[in-house]
Amino acid sequence: MRKLMVEQRKRVEELITSIKEETNGYKLGKPWRHSDKSLTCVVPILKATKDHEREYITITEAKNISIIDTGNINEARVKNEEDKPVFLRLGEILAGGTQERAVTSSRIVFPGTEITIPIVCIHASKGIQKDAVFHFSGYAPNKDYSYIYNTHNFGEANQQESWNLDRTFTSYADSVLGKHGYKITTDWQQVHGQGGQGGHSSSSTPSHSPSISSGQIEAWTNDGTTSSPDFTSHIGSGDIYTQNIGYYQVIDSVVGSNDDLTSKHKEVNELLEDIIKKVPLFEDQVGLALIDPDGFKCLDCYDVKLSYKAIKEALVGKETAAISDTDEENVFEYKPDVARKAINKVLDNQFEENVVHEDGKAKTITLDLEGYMGEAVLLNNKVIHLVITRKE
């Protein structure tokens, strides 16, 4: 366990205390729900102080940054040609002409530098294309936050856990879309088309599994090359297979559309776009917290208003399914005091920190709280981002 310097830990503690006690300009706004049947409410985090000059930009603002697939399932190469550091946040989805991934640990990429960042696959049945270019494609939802766990082990990803959570989210998202009147396709041939030629995918679990020929299965090694192993005895089980040489990918097979987190994420946001737009943006907002029937769900906070404003739509979008989830029997009233108590109960916990990345004036640390986990990023001894989320 790598600990912070005393002064740096103090900075993290001060931010948490300021949010909890609503001091130093911080204030929790009035809880917002899109309807009185909504199961989750959004609590804005406000900071009524003048912003200091920002020393970085977010990925949504960066124009001169390249992110390349190395051919290794757990790594991407990033080059920053901006004149400011670029903040890459954990959970950012990277998409392109290759297998979709999510960033597992936040990083500050300084101007004129090229670094390797840790990533995790979020589309198990799609292959890797070495040297393909990634682009930002939103944030992975809270239910897929396994990569926060991963950083506790110095950035080593638990890939199988991530795939499991991808499928959990796609199933959950389908149930939410169903509540909004959208029909979800469940027949395999409708989803993939005849003969495995592909087709529109609704990301739901197939009602039956097709037969798979050995030619449909390839093993992707960490250097991007492929081989075709013989594991016929496993065919049809719907598992993802791992061996020391790398991660086996089942191409267009029984895992099917139910593992495609990126497409499901986009589908939810496109169909429920009106809800994303309704979530208010306050003048002094630097973050938000989510409260559901189980209590505190997650908190996401930046150091300045400009950063939150730059990523607000994408940040809200990652939780569209939860924000739009409803229950006709729901009679809960989300009062400000109740929401505040739910947040403070979590922030009252002591945390254990682990420094998982250090690069000059930047540090990424994980936070371990009872029942919760999180991450803080420091730049020049200032906390520029804090996230805390429930262990699902």
Image (cartoon, rainbow, N blue to C red):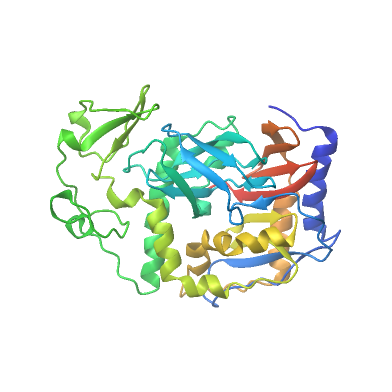
What count of labels does the image hold?
Answer: 0
Using residue 283 as the reference point, say whether residue 292 is left or right of it.
left
Q: Compared to 221, does 17 lie above or below?
A: below
The percent position of residue 11, horizontal first and vertical second, equals: 82, 44
Q: Compared to 17, does 221 lie above or below?
A: above
The percent position of residue 257, horizontal first and vertical second, equals: 30, 52
Q: Compared to 80, does 58 lie above or below?
A: below
The structure residue drawn at horizontal position 36% and vertical position 38%, both measured from the top left corner, is: 128
Q: Which of 191 and 95 is in front in this view?
A: 95
The structure residue drawn at horizontal position 20% and vertical position 39%, both measured from the top left corner, is: 236
The percent position of residue 361, horizontal first and vertical second, equals: 76, 36
Residue 72: quarter of image:
top left
Using residue 67 as the reference point, say whether residue 5 is left or right of it.
right
The N terminus: image quadrant = top right
Residue 113: quarter of image:
top right
The percent position of residue 177, horizontal first and vertical second, equals: 39, 67
The structure residue drawn at horizontal position 51% and vertical position 43%, both measured from the top left corner, is: 67
Using residue 381 as the reference point, say whether residue 85 is left or right of it.
left
Extreme residue in the bottom direction: 36
Using residue 173 as the reference point, say whether residue 9 is left or right of it.
right
